[in-house]
Amino acid sequence: MMALRSTRKARECWSFIRALHKGPAAASACQVSEHIQLSWILTCMVSLPRLQHLHQWKAKAATQEHKRIVGLLTYPVLQAADILLYKSTHVPVGEDQVQHMELVQDLARGFNKKYGEFFPVPKSILTSMKKVKSLRDPSVKMSKSDPDKLATVRITDSQEEIVQKFRKAVTDFTSEVTYDPDSRRGVSNLVAIHAAVTGLSVEEVVRHSAGMDTAHYKLVVADAVIEKFAPIKSEIEKLKMDKGHLEKVLRVGSVKAKELAYPVCQEVKKLVGFL
């Protein structure tokens, strides 16, 4: 019965994809299957303990919900395929992706050692982008996969949803607005978000908020976020209304990607003996 349900679900997903792109021809035009093919080859070259060593796996696997999900282990390998398939030499990453880039480098070196110098070993360019913390648990980063819907602000949220999320943001029992990430994580997270969306420094934000209690300050931050997101949301809605343009972008992009990816993937398959 489980197999039948899985098959039925797969058929429903495929039907949805076909409908989205107005038929199978358009759907296939937007696929770049070389990513999956290279990911499979690289998966055969990496050990289970190596993947279990990644800190994001450790963090997710600590919960009963995620500990048996294979995709948590294999998605960094797909990420590596995305990078190596285009023979990238430099990759901008945040701090939370440094370990994944080390895996990419290890896979490139391992492949080159076995089959000859083929992939450049890409270098990480560490970006200075700061992490936005969860509104409900400021000890962890804000995540779109957080089960608590109040923890994460999305660009597509309505104004009412954004206000509600900031109203419910975790702070503390001190009403003054200060920036002290060690002892006042919640309020400091709000200050950091406020600074990010306004372009002000943390010091300027704190100075402008002097005399304001945290309850009022939450609404000020919410308004600043709404103002920042407004033009982006407007453009998203505009693009969603022009499906023809979106489908064209997908088709043109997939053709360009395939032109680069196909010969690299074919050469890899020759080197490993698939062709």
Image: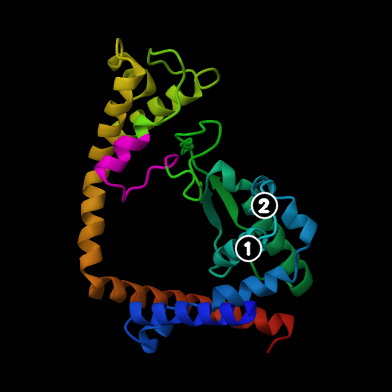
Crowding at dot 2, Cα within 10 Å, few <14 / some 14-19 / many 20+, comes out as: some
Rendered-image quadrant of the C terminus? bottom right
Quadrant in which residue 268 is drawn: bottom right
Secondary element under disc 2, as helix, strand or loop, is helix
Q: Which residue is mark 2?
A: 102
Image position, residue 4 (x, y; %)? 59, 82
The one of 133 and 107 positioned closer to us in this rendering? 133
Crowding at dot 1, Cα within 10 Å, few <14 / some 14-19 / many 20+, comes out as: few
Numbered circle sitting on residue 71: 1
Secondary element under disc 1, as helix, strand or loop, is helix
- Please give the range of residues in magenta: 150-165
Query: Which amino acid does the dot numbered 1 rest on?
Result: Gly
Q: Is residue 197 visible?
A: yes
Quadrant in which residue 110 is drawn: bottom right
Query: Which amino acid does the dot numbered 2 rest on?
Result: Glu
Residue at image position (71%, 81%) is: 271
